[in-house]
Amino acid sequence: MSQPALPTPLTGPAFGSYASDEVTWLLKDLSHLALEAPTADREHAIQSGAANYAESLPVEYSPSPEYQELYTEAVTRAGARLATAVAVVTELALAARNNAPVLVSLARAGTPIGILMRRWAKEIHGLELEHFTMSIVRGVGLDQTALRYLAANFDPARILFVDGWTGKGAISRELSAALDDFAARSGIRFPDDLAVLADPGHCVSMFGTREDYLIPSACLNSTVSGLVSRTVYNVDHIDPHDFHGAKFYSELAPNDVSNSFLDAVCAHFAQVRPDALRLAKEHLAAAPAPSWIGWAAVERISTEYGINNVNLVKPGVGETTRVLLRRVPWKVLVNPEARADVAHVLLLAQQRGTPVEEVPGLPYSCVGLIHPQFDKSAVGADGKAVPNA
């Protein structure tokens, strides 16, 4: 039985604010739909099991001038460190795929990282890498139509999936499971190694750094990600043979810093090149393996704070930022030695009225805890969440 025709991918400037040669979006344009829902309503639907988090979209956070200033400072402060991490992970990617990887970023945190990797390969090695972005949804898996598109156009062995960072490693596990499922269904096997800029959870082997510091592209939402929303998987709008969907927020163009962020990091490439090449060589020789210490820490925190649900524990600077921007936060745990790297998290927590608790020895710079329920009975006399019945 023949497969239905594959949909046509999207490119800028018709979709997204990145140039058409920087990324091809394996997504369906849902810009015409009103998919945003109030944060508390979304959280209730997600936790009750009434809806997957990807069926709707959070209302995009509009940064205050003070927060925007923190973002700008973070880009300046972390520019060289980010460029080094981009360089290292790109060198590892080239080595892993015989200098010819097809970069496939996981939307949307992976997209700016994939573009930066593509730029390093071009500027330093003169290589023109193809770069796509596709959707992965926890509980649903990888977009099967996007995988069919990639298999129809490339040798699957060349595909390399890219993400921004790891938290506890849930996406890494979801990726492997989804690729196993696709192989069982189609007979086509994609490699399941994942390349990330930062791996504080020690979940992957291909990473630029394992330090848990602020990646400025985690600070904002669509305005640092090509003006594209988080991805949507909603069967009311996505047919079985469509790509997963997303929206293009063209109306936010006056606040768009997507390309200036990329340029700010790339400006450090020449400066960091010697160190980055040395670090990449050392990494390849050491071949660090995942230890999953992040997952163990999350399980421990989930139990200690009476949450009993690892999905509500979001470790690392990037994941904590997401909790504060688009979920209902309960608490933020901060390693006191890392306060300089989490200034924007502390500001967001203050703005949202979220308690901050210092935890010496925390294996991450910070951890965001999503509120486990919405009525007062959710919290016992000791301030800990009462497990759901």
Image (cartoon, grey):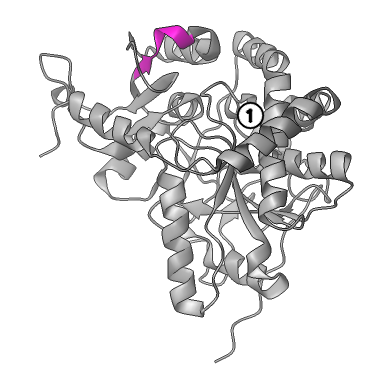
Front-lying residue, 237 or 389: 389
Residue 236 in the image, given as x and y percentages of width and height: 47, 62
The amino acid pointed to by label 1 is Ser
Q: Quarter of the image holding residue 104?
A: bottom right
Horizontal and vertical percent position of residue 134: 61, 55
Q: Quadrant of the C terminus?
A: top left
SS class, disc 1: helix
Magenta stretch? 332-338
Q: Based on the picture, tell me whether residue 58 belongs to the magenta stretch.
A: no
Outermost bottom residue: 1
Q: Is residue 7 above or below residue 292?
A: below
In the rendered structure, the answer to whether residue 305 lies left or right of residue 50 reads left
Residue drawn at x 71%, y 42% as measured from the top left? 90
Q: Residue at x 19, y 30 (%)?
A: 303
Q: Position of residue 282 (x, y in %)?
A: 64, 35
The residue at the point 41 percent across, 7 percent down is: 336
Residue 339 versus residue 29: which sits nearer the camera?
339
As drawn, is 26 to the left or to the right of 266?
Answer: left
Residue under circle 1? 217
